[in-house]
Amino acid sequence: MKNKISKTITNLAENPKNPILKTHKVTTKVHGEVFSSSVTGDIRIIWLISDDKKITILLVDIGGHSGFDRVYD
């Protein structure tokens, strides 16, 4: 799993809109409106772009799409 997460983060850094990431906006109770990108069929990385002038991806959460460790709450 560590390698898949690392590869996803690398892909995000290179191009957050890469179709392989299936990136889309989501709204969570904890983080508000953020982006979600796929690591595996169920594992997601939740992130946002910082407000400063540089493009900085801030990882907010990593977890499942569903189940106990879901990131969409």
Image (cartoon, helix red, strand yellow):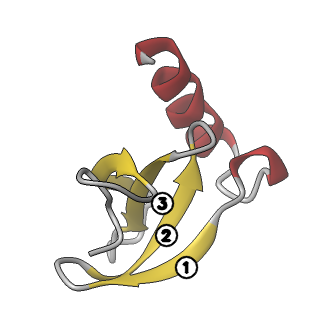
Name the residue beneath numbered marker 1.
Answer: 25
Name the residue beneath numbered marker 2.
Answer: 35
Quarter holding residue 57: bottom left
| Foreground disc of the pair 2, 3 | 2
Q: Earlier in the sequence, mark 2 or mark 3?
A: 2
**Percent of width and height locating residue 28:** 31, 81
- Farthest residue to the left: give it: 30
Q: Secondary structure at mark 2?
A: strand
Q: Secondary structure at mark 3?
A: loop
Name the residue beneath numbered marker 3.
Answer: 55
Circle 2 Cα neighbour tier, 10 Å, few/some/many (<14 / 14–19 / ≥20): many
Q: Earlier in the sequence, mark 3 or mark 1?
A: 1
**Percent of width and height locating residue 32:** 28, 86
Quarter of the picture containing the C terminus is bottom left
| Foreground disc of the pair 3, 1 | 1
Residue sitting nearer the eye, 33 or 40: 40
Q: Earlier in the sequence, mark 2 or mark 1?
A: 1
Tell me how far mark 2 sits from mark 1, CA to CA: 4 Å
Disc 2 + disc 1, Cβ < 8 Å: yes
Q: Is residue 29 left or right of residue 27?
A: left
**Percent of width and height locating residue 65:** 46, 57
**Percent of width and height locating residue 1:** 45, 18
Above or below 68: residue 2: above
Q: Is residue 34 left or right of residue 20?
A: left
